[in-house]
Image: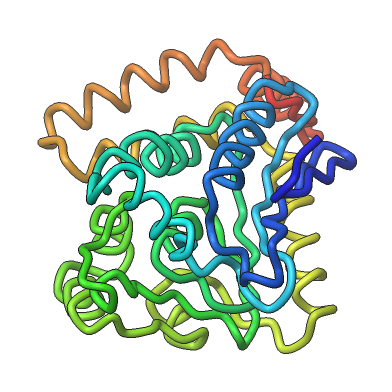
Amino acid sequence: MFEDIEWLEADGVVTIRLNRPEALNALTHTMRRELKEALEEADRNASIRVVVLRGAGRAFCVGQDLREMASYYQREGPRLGKLVEDEYIPLVLKLRQLSKPTVAVVEGPAVGGGMALALATDFRVISARAQLVPAFVNVGLAPDTGTTFLLSRAVGYARALSYSLKGQAIQAEEMVALGLAEGVAATADEVESILAALVNRLKAGPTVAYAAIRRLFDDAQALPLKDVLARERDVQEQLAGTQDHQEAVQAFLEKRTPEFRGQ
């Protein structure tokens, strides 16, 4: 089905694995196209309740494949904005607009555009080897793929600017201190255990509400209080009509645990 990614679906969860371990999962045109297609399929598929994004081998993703970029420049000239517009922006928008919760498993470097993908997910499960590296400046470029939005809102303006100007890696323990992950898994088995516990919790929850909560927090970053209050009101109106909310009310009346179906 795919060439540069793997699609692994089981029990309401899809794992999308970036699968170029020999190149540390550097992003190619093929990988970006396939990742977009996989995210769109995960969004459409009502049986999928959680999306997990991870990389094969030693890295999560080291960003743009520079060999492919050199070939792109030979064909197109230095029209990097076109590449960003056509192939990177759709990925981060899809992750932020996905109707299911998302989890990145980061067990190695997440660099440049790869860091942006990890930041665009709702949760990050990390190992001690995890790094987030805004390395754009190291090749004379500025952050893209939503990095300035996502990183500044995650760690604050001053830290985000400092990391980006220096191309400084955010190490695993610092990721926890900054709230980018809840803890550092000491072993590969512990990564899987933490991931399983998180995924099981998410897939048993009210999926529609998860997506609505993400949208509210993204919108709240840029809107005045009056508009945020109106958005919250409108979202509550919509969620009140979901089966999950009605099930929660009924379960409360019947003194039992609600069984959410993501509808």
Hey, which residue is sitting farthest front in the picture?
A: 74
Question: Which residue does the image show at 22% across and 29% down from the upper left?
Answer: 229
Task: Give 184 or 151, whichever is nearer the viewer.
Answer: 151
Task: Give 227 or 162, whichever is nearer the viewer.
Answer: 162
What coloring was used for the rendering? rainbow
Side of 206 where 90 appears, left or right: left
Q: Position of residue 14 (x, y in %)?
A: 77, 42
Side of 10 where 154 appears, left or right: left
Question: Which residue does the image show at 50% across and 41% down from the upper left?
Answer: 95
How many numbered discs sit on the rendered protein?
0
Q: Position of residue 5 (x, y in %)?
A: 71, 49
Task: Give 27 or 200, whichever is nearer the viewer.
Answer: 27
| Camera sees residue 4 | yes
Q: Is residue 132 above or below residue 12?
A: below
Hey, which residue is sitting farthest top in the picture?
A: 241
Location of residue 193 (image quadrant):
bottom right
Q: Quick one: quadrant of the N terminus?
A: top right
Hey, which residue is sitting farthest right in the picture?
A: 11
| Camera sees residue 214 | no
Question: Which residue does the image show at 63% across and 70% down from the upper left?
Answer: 23
Location of residue 223 (image quadrant):
top left
Question: Which residue does the image show at 89% across and 40% down from the upper left?
Answer: 11
Side of 179 where 103 appears, left or right: right
Q: Quick one: quadrant of the C terminus?
A: top right
Q: Position of residue 244 (x, y in %)?
A: 66, 23
Q: Is residue 143 above or below residue 94?
A: below
Q: Position of residue 60 (x, y in %)?
A: 60, 68
